Image (cartoon, coloured by chain):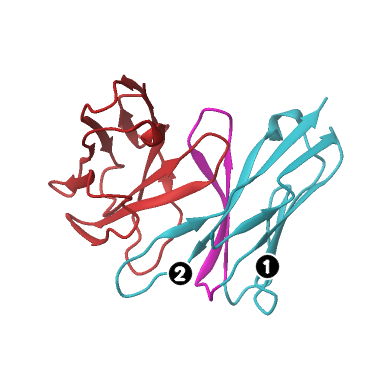
Amino acid sequence: SQQGEEDPQALSIQEGENATMNCSYKTSINNLQWYRQNSGRGLVHLILIRSNEREKHSGRLRVTLDTSKKSSSLLITASRAADTASYFCATDVSKAAGNKLTFGGGTRVLVKP
Amino acid sequence: GAGVSQSPSNKVTEKGKDVELRCDPISGHTALYWYRQRLGQGLEFLIYFQGNSAPDKSGLPSDRFSAERTGESVSTLTIQRTQQEDSAVYLCASSPRTSYTGELFFGEGSRLTVL
C-alpha cells in the first residue's frame, strides 16, 4: 500500500474559492513535499515542510504538518482556473540504503471559471 | 539544457519488444530517480541513482527492468520483452541533494504504449 494517501481523490470548486486537500502517511518522515501535475506534464515542486515544522506558506499555498497524526494538508486560497491540476504529496523516508520520495495517489482539482 | 530532458516523449511498441528510455538530468545533479505513473494513478518508485551507483533498486517490478547511469549524467531505463502492463508514463527526476531527499526536478516523461 502507498505511504501517502490523498483525500479527496477529486475536488471541484469555483474560481475564487479555497481548495483543501489532505495527505496521510504511515511511517516516520524526514520531510513531506507537495507537487502539482498539469495534464500530460511532469510534476512541479510546490513546497517542502520538514518534520520539525508545523506550518509553511508560499504565496497562495499553506501547508500544515501534524506528525502525531501522520497527516498534512495543502490549502490553495483564492483559487484560479490555472490551479486546475493534480496535486500529490510525497514523503521522504531516506535511510542508509538511499533517498527517495514516496508519492500518494493524488487529488484531482478542477477550478471552474 | 535548463531542465530534465527525457526521450522519446512517446513510444509505441509491440508486446515482446525491448525499449530504451533516456533521461538527461540537470547538469550537476548527483541524484537521479525513475518513477512509473499508470493512467490516473500516483507515482511508483522504480530506482534511484546516487552518482553512477544505484543504492535502491527496490522498485524495479521484475528482472525485465534494468537501468544504468554513466558519467554521473545520462541514465537509460531498459524494459525487455515488454508486456501490456508496462504501458505507462515513465518519469525521470533529478536532485542536487545527497544527504536527504529535497526538491525533485521532473522531466515531462516518456509515454510507453505496449500493443
- Residue B68: assigned label: none
CA separation in Å, label 1 and label 2? 15 Å
Left or right relative to B94: residue A69: right
Q: Which residue type does callout 1 highlight?
A: Ser
Badge 2: chain ID: A
Left or right relative to A99: residue A72: right
Q: Position of residue A69 (x, y in %)?
A: 70, 75
Q: Nearer the viewer, residue B97 or B48?
A: B48
- Magenta-tinted stretch: A27-50
Q: Position of residue B95 (x, y in %)?
A: 36, 52
Q: Nearer the viewer, residue A64 or B20?
A: B20
The magenta stretch spans residue A46:
yes
Which callout, 1 or 2, points at the residue further toward the start of the chain?
1
Q: Nearer the viewer, residue A47 or A73?
A: A73
Q: Residue at x 63, y 73 (%)?
A: A53
Callout 1 crowding tier (Cα within 10 Å): few <14, some 14–19, many ≥20: some
**Chain in cyan on the image:** A
Left or right relative to B80: residue A60: right
- Marks 1 and 2: CB-CB under 8 Å? no
Q: Residue at x 35, y 55 (%)?
A: B59
- Vertical comparison of A77 with A1: above or below: above
Q: Position of residue B13 (x, y in %)?
A: 30, 21
Look at mark 1 in the image and give the residue it sits on: A71
- The quadrant of the rendering that contains the C terminus of chain A is top right
**Chain in red on the image:** B
Look at mark 2 in the image and give the residue it sits on: A93
Callout 2 crowding tier (Cα within 10 Å): few <14, some 14–19, many ≥20: some
Q: Residue at x 28, y 32 (%)?
A: B82
Left or right relative to B107: residue A44: right
Badge 1: chain ID: A
